[in-house]
């Protein structure tokens, strides 16, 4: 099968768009103003990966389902890779300073190091560094 050129847009409901923008800005993310208004914003995660942060009222227009209470249930786990272990720790420090919380214990498998956090709306994120050259051979 031929590899498709594609982009990923993750859509997340948020209670307070401005607070979410401030939180993720403090973590170092930027936003595309072309896709930002008072109902939603497009957070740039990477060259072809984005998160649409959408106020709950507007998010409800895209689905007939109830919005998951992320404080009680898990619907998605968002994992983002970074360039080294130090960056993982740096982001978690910024999360805590910005009002988020670290979630789960640190996991260090030698070849992969990751930590997780909850954002202001309790969405579960993981930040990880992976060195595939160190992956244990079978």
Image: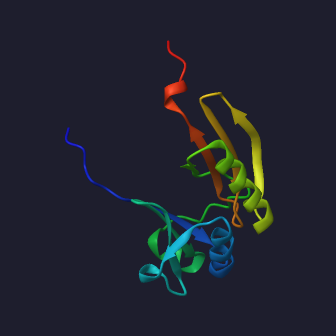
Instruction: Please tell me which residue is depicted at 48% across the width and 68% down the height of the picture.
Output: 64
Q: Is residue 63 above or below residue 37?
A: above
Instruction: Please tell me which residue is depicted at 80% across the width and 65% down the height of the picture.
Output: 97
Farthest residue, direction top: 138
Closer-to-camera residue (104/31): 31
Instruction: Please tell me which residue is depicted at 52% across the width and 64% down the height of the picture.
Output: 65
On the image, the x and y values in percent for residue 96 come to 79, 60
Q: Is residue 99 above or below residue 57?
A: above
Which quadrant: the N terminus? top left
On the image, the x and y values in percent for residue 22 come to 67, 76
On the image, the x and y values in percent for residue 103 come to 75, 49
The quadrant holding residue 7 is bottom left
On the image, the x and y values in percent for residue 120 come to 72, 67
What colouring style does the render use? rainbow
| Residue 105 left/right relative to 130 | right
Q: Is residue 7 above or below residue 3?
A: below
| Residue 91 left/right relative to 99 | left
Instruction: Please tell me which residue is depicted at 27% across the width and 53% down the height of the picture.
Output: 5
Farthest residue, direction left: 2
Badge count: 0
The quadrant holding residue 47 is bottom left
């Amino acid at each position: 099968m031929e590899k498709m050129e594609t982009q990923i847009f993750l859509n997340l409901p948020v209670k307070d768009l401005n607070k979410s923008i401030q939180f993720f800005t403090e973590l170092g993310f930027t936003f595309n103003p072309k896709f930002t208004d008072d109902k939603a914003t497009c957070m740039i995660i990477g060259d072809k990966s984005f998160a649409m942060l959408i106020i709950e009222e507007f998010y409800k227009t895209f689905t007939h389902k109830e919005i998951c209470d992320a404080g009680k249930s898990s619907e998605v786990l968002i994992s983002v890779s970074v360039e080294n272990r130090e960056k993982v720790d740096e982001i978690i420090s910024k999360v805590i300073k910005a009002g988020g919380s670290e979630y789960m214990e640190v996991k260090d498998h030698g070849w992969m190091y990751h930590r997780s956090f909850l954002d202001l709306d309790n969405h579960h994120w993981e930040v990880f560094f992976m060195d595939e050259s160190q992956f244990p051979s079978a």
